[in-house]
Image (cartoon, helix red, strand yellow):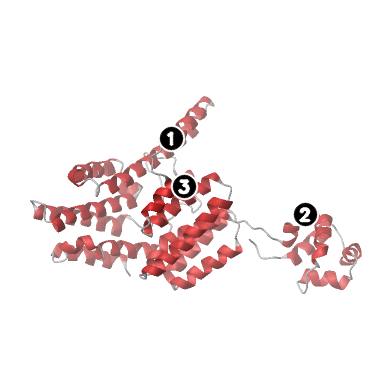
Amino acid sequence: MNELNISTIIAQNRREKAMTQEQLASYMGVSKASVSKWETGQSYPDITFLPQLATLFNISIDQLMGYSPQMTKEEIRKLYQRFAKSFSEEPLEDVLEKLRETERKYYSCFPLLYQLAVLRLNHFMLTEDRNHQLEILAEADAICERIVAESGDPFLSKEALSLQAMFSLMSQKPERVLELLGEDIRPMSSDETGLAQAYLMLGNADEARRVTQVAAYQHLLIFMSTATTLLSLQPNQFELLLKRLLITGETFELEKLHPNTMALLYLQGAQGYCQKLMGETDPEPEKAASEALGLLKKYTDLCTSGFFPYSLHGDDLFTDLDSWFADFDLGNGYPRSEKVIRESMLQGVEQNPFFKVLEDREEFRKIVSALKANLIS
């Protein structure tokens, strides 16, 4: 929403109609001095004059006042990036208050409100006070509740509902997740297949390829994410699944294509081996410790040399992704500032309770030192 600039708009439209201040004053039934004050911002027209002025200039009253309750995608993107940067430079509560002010100002701009909720999800952990964390998540949840109820946008409402499920997980409310998402697993959409076939029938092979590439890329990342979660749920198949995931990641060169996916896999794999050590059930504890340290070394190398500057991009296989990324609400950048990301990378190892079993090992201390030296300036 732009600041009200009715004075400039009156002056501009009067000139476009080749009217003098005297002529406009006569038309409106006011003095020339009144028109002059309107145009210099010293006073505003009485509210009863607005319909008459809007009719004269052939514009809406909102246009006359320079008012828009919505923001463009580019404006939302820039505002998000500005807030993400603020989270790394300013006190948390100060930034949160700015988010609240923005929410009040753009009360019906639902795409923006969604991103304000995402900002809270990506930064609520900046406070160590658990009650404060829950308050931040509750604020974000309330925003999404209103998006679902009032936006009238099916896609945005679905995204907001998924975000609410995330908030519920973070707030330790699993029953609410089931209530929000339902307990049944629905088949994945195959819309992209129909789209690709339609483009082929229209003779547009380039667009058919682009749609299919985007779908394949998304399915690849979804598989890697869900299977990485499965590592902790199938302890008897842990090493077999980890092996297959590492092979998949290497095959598709995910360290370059989507390094965050591989960083999470290395971390989750290392945690899995440490769980074996913590449970004292592994017949080869030294082998488990060695595997965990090897994965942490991969994590460290990736975080300190192949991660920044971060941006979503295609590669030699996925050649048509860049235009798709460019159309994202937040562009092809990361939803948190680089400083916050670097700190979280270090915390993922240094403050991870699973890795306490490695604290006495020199290799682990070297890994933590390398992360500190290369991530935290």
Name the one closer to the observer, 249 or 180: 180
Q: Position of residue 9 (x, y in %)?
A: 75, 62
Q: Amino acid at mark 2?
A: Ile
Q: Amino acid at mark 3?
A: Phe
User: In this picture, is 226 found above or below 112?
Assistant: above
Name the one closer to the observer, 158 or 213: 158
Q: Is residue 276 left or right of residue 192?
A: left
Tell me the quarter of the picture where residue 164 sits: bottom left
Please name the residue that numbered disc 2 is placed on: 59
User: In this picture, is 33 found above or below 191?
Assistant: below
Circle 1: element type? helix
- Residue 288 visible in this rendered orientation of the protein: yes
In the image, which is nearer the foreground, mark 2 or mark 3?
2
Please name the residue that numbered disc 3 is placed on: 325
The label shown at residue 212 is 1
- Please report whichever mark, 2 or 3, sits nearer to the chain's N-terminal start: 2
- Please report whichever mark, 1 or 2, sits nearer to the chain's N-terminal start: 2
- Please report whichever mark, 1 or 3, sits nearer to the chain's N-terminal start: 1
Cα distance, mark 2 to mark 3?
36 Å
Q: Amino acid at mark 1?
A: Thr
User: In this picture, is 337 found above or below 179?
Assistant: below
Name the one closer to the observer, 256 or 140: 140
Cα distance, mark 1 to mark 2?
44 Å
